[in-house]
């Protein structure tokens, strides 16, 4: 059963829910992957939003591990949301539930995505590296994706460059090299995206940041999404165009295999 840990010091006013920040982590066999990277990003988001955080990170690490252990869920999604309050430290709320994995069929066949007209906030107004709780742009994009009968939506910036999906980073493979949009376009630098650069170097696959248009996507040899919950998963249809012959390509499969091997090594899994 899912385990929910309420805010540690009582209920919060509804207005606090709109401008808090959060992180979503994944546990493998009861062990959190790249916890420190997630905490770095959480504290960075809070600093940008002016949210007072606990001075000691141990004040967050301990309840995170306790919530995970009490849940009894070994393969889990762990979300911590920091809710600001006046003149005091933000209150953490922790939710643990079974990780919502893509299906085996989706890993084998790839996802269907569409570039949608919904937009996120302007880069000049809110830093894309601040992972804050108000997610209206993503909600509208997901609604659009559902109406189109696809699995995920891709955002574009105002100049027509593809940036990311609603909850994942995006990349393509062209002539054997990985291309992924740069963060300055307005996308969040994902923890798994960072791992992607490590994996590419280890696998000796060229990787670089590049501006990507719809034309680039439609003519890619491969396409994929990366995220904490999806790991690395192929994209085989974009706006109805078939990519990689309709199956995840060899580079995507190598990245997924390499990612899972890295997780096993880092967390010393059985």
Image (tube, rainbow, N blue to C red):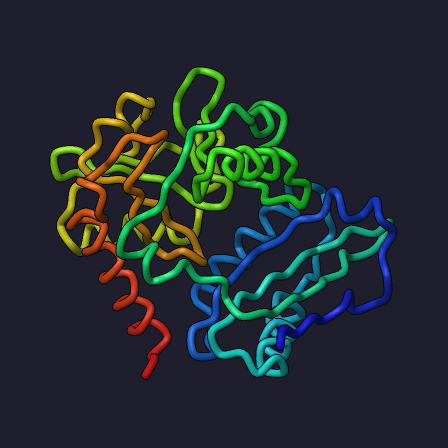
Q: Residue 37: where, in percent of width, then height?
A: 47, 58
x then y, percent, for residue 126: 62, 31
220 sits left or right of 175 in the view: right
| Along the viewing direction, whichever of 177 and 73 lies nearer the viewer | 73
User: Which of the pair 36/188 is nearer the observer?
Assistant: 188
Quadrant hosting residue 259: bottom left
Give 141 or 28, whichever is nearer the viewer: 141
Q: How many marks overall?
A: 0
**Left or right of 192 in this view: 73:** right
Q: Is residue 67 above or below residue 172?
A: below
Question: What's the residue at 22%, 40% (across, down)?
Answer: 222
Q: Residue at x 23, y 36 (%)?
A: 243
Query: In the rendered view, would you say 172 is above or below 210?
Result: below
Location of residue 240 (image quadrant): top left
- Give the vertical position of 134 relative to 186 (above or below): below
Give the image location of residue 151, x and y in percent.
44, 44
Q: Which image quadrant: the C terminus?
A: bottom left
- Outermost residue, top side: 159
Residue at image position (44%, 62%) is 101
Indicate the position of residue 1 as horizontal and vertical percent values. Answer: 62, 77
Q: Quadrant of residue 217?
A: top left
The residue under the point 33% across, 23% down is: 214
């Amino acid at each position: 059963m899912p385990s929910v840990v309420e805010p540690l010091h009582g209920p919060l006013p509804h207005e606090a829910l709109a401008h808090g920040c959060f992180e979503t982590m994944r546990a493998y066999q009861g062990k959190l992957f790249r916890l420190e990277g997630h905490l770095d990003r959480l504290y960075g988001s809070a600093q940008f939003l002016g949210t007072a955080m606990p001075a000691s990170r141990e004040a967050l690490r301990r309840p995170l591990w306790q919530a995970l252990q009490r849940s009894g869920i070994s393969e889990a999604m762990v979300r911590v949301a920091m809710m600001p309050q006046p003149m005091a430290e933000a209150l953490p709320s922790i939710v643990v539930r079974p990780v919502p994995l893509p299906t085996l069929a989706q890993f084998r066949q790839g996802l269907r995505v569409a570039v949608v007209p919904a937009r996120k906030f302007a880069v000049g107004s809110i830093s894309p590296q601040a992972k804050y709780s108000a997610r209206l742009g993503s909600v509208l994009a997901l609604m659009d994706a559902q109406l189109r009968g696809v699995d995920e939506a891709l955002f574009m910036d105002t100049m027509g460059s593809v940036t990311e999906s609603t909850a994942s980073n995006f990349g393509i493979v062209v002539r054997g090299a990985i291309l992924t949009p740069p963060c300055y376009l307005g996308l969040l630098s994902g923890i798994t995206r960072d791992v992607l650069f490590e994996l590419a170097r280890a696998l000796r696959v060229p990787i670089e940041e590049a501006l990507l248009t719809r034309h680039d996507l439609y003519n890619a040899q491969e396409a994929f999404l990366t995220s904490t919950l999806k790991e690395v998963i192929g994209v085989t249809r974009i706006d109805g165009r078939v990519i990689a012959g309709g199956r995840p390509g060899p580079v995507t499969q190598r990245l997924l295999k390499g990612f899972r091997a890295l997780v096993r090594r880092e967390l010393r899994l059985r």
